Amino acid sequence: MSVEKGTASQPANLATTMRGLFRSMRPRQWTKNGFVFAGVLFDGKLFQPDYLISALAGFVVFCFLSSAVYLINDVVDAPADRLHPTKRNRPIARGDVAAPVAVALAAVLALGSLTAAFALHPGFGLIGLLYFGSTMLYTLSLKHIVIVDVLVLALGFVLRVGGGAVLAEAIRFSPWMYLCMMLLALLLGFGKRRQELVELGGSSSTRAILSEYSIPLLDQIISVVTAVTLAAYSFYTFSAPALPADHTMMLTIPFVVYGIFRYLYLVHVKGAGGAPDELLITDRPLQIGIALWTITAVIVLYVLPQ
């Protein structure tokens, strides 16, 4: 009896395994690690080579550290993923990568990344360890607790920002930014949960935690988080002590408003919120909005004060 290609029973050759391992590392999701650069940007050190190189190194560390977690997550979720309309195509669920191989690579990536993190800065190493520990807890248990699952994901974004601030030896980095990053992460997380429910037609058969959510509930939460996020960022632009005294940072508010509204449009109209981090590399209007925000922020923080 022949075995159908792509099933979990099919032995994978070396090339298939290598491709599968790389896909399982989810390089498309490395964009979220760009939050590490918030420290050098908002502390006025973006053009100081030493700090920029440290931030780049921190970005790489978080990329490999997060990939280690993704590998473990896909091993744990493989049985449920095989029942999902799209996740069943993940290499580990499909059988392209054997679970022991994925776990071995995850161990290497985690150990190497944490070693590099402590070598960069002891504080950064502790943040990396906290990130790895919290995301592993998420993978093994916390993702099954309603609301806590999204809060833990938001914590990961805050830790990325904190790690970047440590590497930048930030002295002007405002606590408002931690709040804004956490709220933005919550918005993305709840938007992702909503899209997962939509994709599954309201069924939770492939992910138990979805039974604790409903689309009306998520819509209410998203509305609240959206309003608070916009308010928090607006307060940041004219109240953070490290910003220009003439409040020119407020010029960036329209781009934040557009970016958030564009994301909500993609979620509610286009049904594209299932992988919000990947929207950064696929949605051109969103990319333009982020680019304009970045350019405006750099001008406000680095050009106008002089």
Image (cartoon, rainbow, N blue to C red):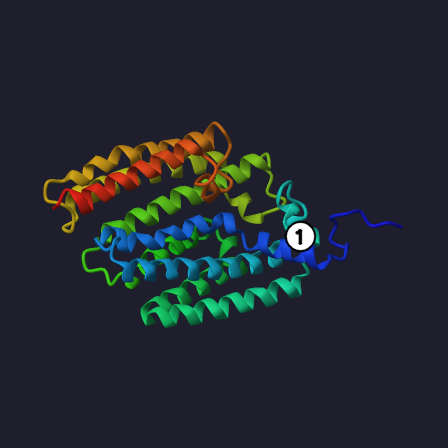
Residue 292: quarter of image: top left
Q: Please state the total of marks drawn on the protein image.
A: 1
Q: Nearer the viewer, residue 57 or 158?
A: 57
Left or right: where 15 falls relative to 197: right
**Residue lying farthest to the front in this orientation:** 49
- Residue 33 place in picture, x, y as percent: 41, 53
Secondary element at image label 1: helix
Q: Is residue 284 above or below residue 99?
A: above
Q: Residue at x 47, y 62 (%)?
A: 65
* Residue 225: quarter of image: top left
Q: Position of residue 90 (x, y in %)?
A: 63, 49
At x 46% / y 33%, what residue is drawn? Answer: 267
For badge 1, the amino acid type reads Ala
| Residue 30 visible to the viewer | yes
Q: Which residue is mark 1?
A: 93
Residue in front for this viewpoint, 141 or 252 = 252
The residue at the far left in this view is 245
Q: Where, by quadrant of the figure, is residue 169 drawn? A: bottom left
The outermost residue toward the top is 269
Residue at the spot x=38%, y=47% of the render? 185
Q: Which residue is located at x 59 percent, y 43 percent?
A: 204
Number of other residues with Cα within 10 Å of mark 1, as a class: few under 14, some 14 to 19, many 20 or more: many
70 lies left or right of 37: right
Across and down, in percent, residue 258 comes to 33, 32
Residue 279 at what x, y percent from top left? 46, 39
Q: Is residue 274 left or right of residue 85?
A: left
Is residue 228 visible in the rendered image? The answer is no
